[in-house]
Amino acid sequence: MRHPWGVESTPGQGAGRDGSQPPVLRRQDTRLDSYVDRYAARTHGMTASAIRALFAVANRPEVVSLAGGMPNIADLPLDVVGSSLQDLVLNRGLQAMQYGSGQGEPEIREAICEVMRLEGISAHPDDVTVTVGSQQALDLATRIFCDPGDVVLCEAPSYVGALGVFRSYQCDVAHVAMDEQGLVPEALREAVLALRAAGRKVKFVYTIPSFHNPAGVTQSLERREAILAVAEETDLLVVEDNPYGLLGFDADPIPAIRSLSDDRVVYLGTFSKTFAPGFRIGWVLAPHAVREKLVLAQESATLCPPTFSQFAITAYLAQHDWQGQIKVFAEMYRERRDAMLAGLADNMPAGVTWTVPAGGFYVWVTLPPGFDAQAMLPRAVTARVAYVPGTAFYADGFGSRHLRLSYCFPTPERILEGTRRLGDVLAREADLMSTFGTSVSGPRTPELSTHLAPGTNQA
């Protein structure tokens, strides 16, 4: 066994009779990761997701987790899905369990075009690339467009998984301001012009226009048109991420940005929210030339997306009323959204504000001055409630006064209890701050806070 102390001679002191020097002990530290000097530079940008880090605690049964955005598939007709899978194995098993196309199977690409038609998108199956969830779609798009040091524009706040992808490819993220209708077009224009004037290369703007994660807001059709106009004016690519677009509570889906432009927008979609996340099937709709690069990137990453999952989803779409099932999901999420809003109205201290989502999974909460959601989290978990601190959704250190609450998975009763526990935590924090002379008073208005986006900040 190697001793942690090395032996070394020090000349000129305490020589022995034979002239030798006495041994001197010097510490030789060891590393937990002996490969640290071998990793590529891009690995330095890889960090653990704040949401995954919460899972071990948030999944304890005594904790009400308002943190993770796990879809609730309890209302999925498992008998229908099971029968469909049995038929698939018996009748097409040899094909479904074999390698497939790197672009994705033709049948599912045709079905995807029908799904996108609900949001006004007219597309050809040849321009669809199937991916392992929309997370891989975002990874592949970033991989083919971005070099280290390139700038990606993102809403402030933005999806934590997207920020992780951009960091892993050594991109710099510049946040662009949002308001109650999402990304602000004029702020986008100013950011592009300022960055280019500084000699920076802006590759694309990443946006979640419908039921934003984490902010819960939705871009109106007029806002989408204005954002696209800025993109046209500044020759900017738009990457539109739309996992929640069909899960609206009060109206038909707003036409996607991609429905307004065939060559300016790369569109990302997924079946994780409208069917089931375990099949891990998403897609990219891109201009033809971009699609060629995406297929090459897909083949080098996975050879082909999961063939069995593609056949399974294709069978489900063909044999089941999938549009009716999406409405069932939306009504279930509406009930949970209503419970969340009621719980916040009943339990939040004065000065706390929040967004009112018209669909999707999330509410974005803004705390009064002096609160720190990240520092408060351990005390919240001790009180048996979990959330995601707002700092997870910024690349530039902002977000300490914000937190994201998810209502998609817990029952309405658990949501109400979770907001009660969170209200108690905030009340205790307010008492502590009052004791030390920090004012937290302010109006309570359940609307998008003016502090949602601090402006354009470059990481």
Image (cartoon, rainbow, N blue to C red):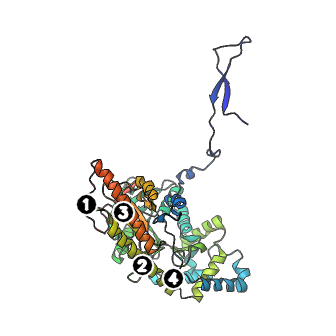
Which mark is in front, 4 or 1?
Answer: 1
Looking at the rendered structure, which numbered label has been put on residue 423? 3
Q: Amino acid at mark 1?
A: Gly
Q: Earlier in the sequence, mark 4 or mark 2?
A: 4
440 horizontally vs 279: left or right: left
Residue position for label 1: 442
Q: CA distance from mark 4 to mark 1?
A: 45 Å
Q: Amino acid at mark 2?
A: Glu
Query: Which residue shows up at 31% across the image and 69% down it?
Result: 447
For the point 39% across and 59% down, the residue is 175
Asked if residue 306 shows in the view, the reply is yes
Looking at the image, tell me whether mark 2 or mark 3 is earlier in sequence order: 2
User: Would you say 251 lies left or right of 167 here?
Assistant: left
In front of the other: 235 or 103: 103
Q: Residues within 10 Å of mark 2 (few under 14, many from 20)?
A: some
The residue tagged 2 is: 335
Give the SS element for disc 2.
Answer: helix
Who is closer to the viewer here, 71 or 212? 71
Q: CA distance from mark 3 to mark 1?
A: 16 Å
Kindly indicate whether the residue at mark 3 contacts the one at mark 2 (C-beta within 8 angstroms). Answer: no
Distance from Cα at disc 1 to Cα at disc 2 = 29 Å
Give the amino acid type for the residue marked by disc 4 in the picture.
Answer: Val
Residue 105 visible in rendering: no
